[in-house]
Image (cartoon, rainbow, N blue to C red):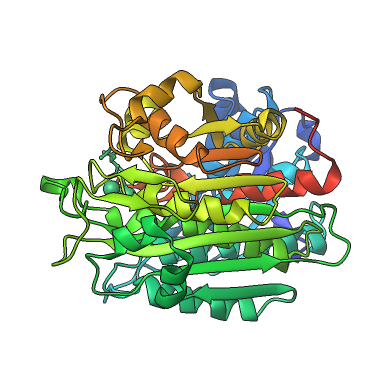
Amino acid sequence: MNIVLDRIDFNNLQQSAVVIYGSEVATRTLPFKRDEVAYINARRADDANALVVLNRLPHKLYVQNFDSDLNSEEALEKLRRAACEIQKMLVKEKVQEVAVSGLGIIPEELVAFVEGLHMANYRFDKYRSKKETMLNKVTVDKLFLDAKTLEENRVLWRRIDTCRDWVNEPIMYLNAPQFADILKAEAEKIANVKCTILGQKKIESLGMGGLLAVNRGSEDEARFVVLEYKPKGAVNKQPVALVGKGIMYDTGGLNIKPDDYMQEMKSDMAGAATMASVLLTAAENKLPVYLMAFLPLTDNRPGKNAYAADDILRMYDGTTVEVVNTDAEGRLILADAIAYADKQNPELIIDAATLTGAAVRAIGSHAIAGMQQDAASPFSLMTIVGNQVYERIAPMPFWKEYDELIKSELADLRNCGSKPEAGCITAGRFLAHFAHHPYIHLDIAGVAYYAQQESFYGVGASGFGIRLLYAFLQMRTEREYLTA
Ligand code: BES
Ligand code: ZN
Ligand code: ZN
């Protein structure tokens, strides 16, 4: 979707247009006819957020009433959602161009609306013979937006689309070696970004026992991708380490997933896709923050030599792990990645992972389950940022008492809890064992992929978390984390 800036003349519309009509605007200043004003105001009196569609043949004018008398975060989310509803109507009418402006609103509100429009306009339709006619041009009223702000957001929104493409792609077209090559090609296009792909041999020589075990059943080699974005004048000397779960497909392995539990497991690399996208967005927008990403990639399958329950693994950092269930594979590859990231002396390690069904059962699909170790202040900052962009974090308890559940008789740890309770937390505690720097764990299992449409996040891969982490890093460029 192409977004341009221009002036919009409502009395001489050259295309369909949306005007967001704020709550405190003098009626006399409206660019509507008298009878239109009467009609809009009547609808507005009934419902402060009513959408009124006016026919300005051959175009339509969509008047989105907007009651900003809410805390502003909710108001902005309401605009993103309203944009999604309007996008649906435009697509239904096969409208490809639309203009967007506002009355009595602030630039941030217009950005939120265009964000919703852009995200709603995403489709993964490359395998469909008949494609829907989507919006392809949006003209934004330049009264509200400068070119620089638009460009920064455009980069972010494009990255979200690309991330969703990666996550939606089935395993048969996107395996670990292929994804690693794509990341390298993307990295090479951007200044100050370096991509190193560690191949099978290197992973073996490093002794990444978790990644190697999960990969044993696979026909494809594993990869470990390291991205580095090191701009001159970065605010931090030690990198922020972004770790992402890159299970290209999760069959469960020998503990194979039953019935329809396997469906959607192409999305089990959403953590890796998210973290790569965050780093690339920051680099494209030249954010002055030093970042590294660590992305362990493989699929999890029951092959001839697949790892099995009862196996005991030696991880990259020397910890031994008893395998109890081959479907708890994410924490095995992440343990190696976190231990490896930890050696780079990062100021903060953040991981994103579609880690547990337990996270979905605990909090559903509206938030990320978040946990932290030695990172109370960046975590609370991230939670605040999450509320602002409405990609929210639900903090989970993270007490050391949960470690009882992942103790093993035979090894240092077991890869899933000895009781089924608190599955999302025991998974996090397992990972925290491998981090010796401030650490934040984000379980994105509930939000990374939607089976049914979830407003502007659409159906399928959502890109949820990219806006959150990008906004968090923007914040990092403005201030130190308060000391914990
Ligand atoms: N990839 C899954 C978690 C998942 C489930 C993500 C549903 C998205 C939606 C993970 O590897 C897994 O299978 N976890 C098991 C762990 C269990 C065996 C301890 C789970 O949550 O059931
Ligand atoms: Zn699994
Ligand atoms: Zn998994």
Q: Quadrant of the N terminus?
A: bottom right
The residue shown at (35%, 33%) is 360
Front residue of this view, candidates 464 and 399:
399
Q: Position of residue 182 (x, y in %)?
A: 49, 77
Residue, far front: 410
| Residue 14 to residue 252: above or below | below
Residue, far left: 259
| Residue 469 to residue 412: above or below | below
> Quick check: 434 left or right of 299?
right
On the question of residue 110 being in view, the answer is no
Dividing the picture into quarters, in which one does residue 36 lie?
Answer: top right
The residue shown at (38%, 52%) is 314
Q: Quadrant of the C terminus?
A: top right
| Residue 402 to residue 295: above or below | above
Q: How many marks?
A: 0
Dividing the picture into quarters, in which one does residue 455 lie?
Answer: top left
Front residue of this view, candidates 111 and 31:
111
> Quick check: 173 left or right of 387?
left
Q: Position of residue 218 (x, y in %)?
A: 24, 68
Front residue of this view, candidates 303 and 275:
303
On the question of residue 476 being in view, the answer is yes
Q: Position of residue 261 (x, y in %)?
A: 19, 45
Dividing the picture into quarters, in which one does residue 169 lie?
Answer: bottom left
The residue shown at (67%, 36%) is 385
Q: Position of residue 388 (x, y in %)?
A: 66, 35
| Residue 47 to residue 260: above or below | above
